[in-house]
Amino acid sequence: MTHKEKSPALISIVVRAADPVSLQGAEVLLRRSEGAMLLPADQLARADVVLVLANEVTEDAMSWMEEASAVSVNPEMRIVLVADRISRPRLARAVRLGLVSVLPRAQAGFPEITQAVLNSRAGGAQMPGELLRSLIEELRTLLRDPTGAILPGGFEGREVEVLRLLAEGLDTTEIAARLNYSERTIKNIIFAVTRRLNLRNRTHAVAYAMRVGAL
């Protein structure tokens, strides 16, 4: 009597991309890949892996990663980034959000991207040497000055900028214009900080930041 082998669990994936062509191409490829299950963007919280495609990692791209980290109900969620440029501070932030692999967009084909996505769920990670060195330098900076990245109460500098403008009475649209971010990025920053610090809403976040001395 033969026994059927148990098929491995599918890896659920959400794709975020800076342009629709890259998004559609990646989604078509992943739908054809064994072991992959493509999820729509509104099921981001369930994703095992979030694939982010961008030329240069802007604050909008960072907001996608922050949103994924904030809403995820999966403690093992991982992020794979395909991009040509990312600054050292943003790389460090992305790693804290769950980034495990970075592939240079100019060199990575869809087979390499697919393999990186599938490998990441099994603990695999890959990063170009120059980015790995950059990440190590950022870690050294934090070790030399651990207060430089995190402010009182566990706030990050960018979060304090947003909360300070909220305290001044600006709305989301006005804050986005002042800081040169998208409104979605501002909303994601507020959502991420309230969730991470267990705060009820933006008013509570402003009051808490004032109380702990971050504002």
Image (spheres, rainbow, N blue to C red):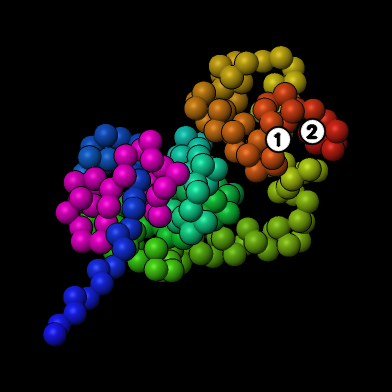
Compared across the picture, whether 177 is left or right of 84 comes to: right
Placement of the N terminus among the 4 image quadrants? bottom left
- Residue 187 lies, with reference to residue 88, above or below; the image says above
Secondary structure beneath label 2: helix
Which portion, as a residue range, is magenta?
A: 26-54
Residue lying at 45% horizontally and 44% vertically, measured from the top left: 45
Task: Measure the alpha-carbon separation of dots 2 and 1.
Answer: 8 Å
Residue placed at 70% from the left, 21% from the top?
166
> Residue 171: horizontal and vertical position, in percent?
62, 16
Nearest to the eye among marks 2 and 1: give it: 1
Q: Residues within 10 Å of mark 2 (few under 14, many from 20)?
A: some
Residue at 59% across, 19% down = 172
Task: Tell me the number on the disc at residue 208.
Answer: 2
Q: Which residue is mark 1?
A: 199
Q: Is residue 135 left or right of residue 21?
A: right
**Mark 1 is on which residue type?**
Leu
Quarter-of-image position of residue 176 = top right
Spot occupied by residue 185 in the image (x, y as percentages of width and height)? 52, 31
Furthest toward the bottom, the residue is 1
Which sits in the foreground, 167 or 207? 207
Q: Is residue 136 visible?
A: yes
Residue 95 against residue 197 in the figure, above or below: below
Relative to residue 184, is residue 212 drawn left or right? right
Q: Is residue 30 magenta?
A: yes
Q: Position of residue 188 (x, y in %)?
A: 55, 33
**Which quarter of the rendered picture does the C terminus lie within?**
top right
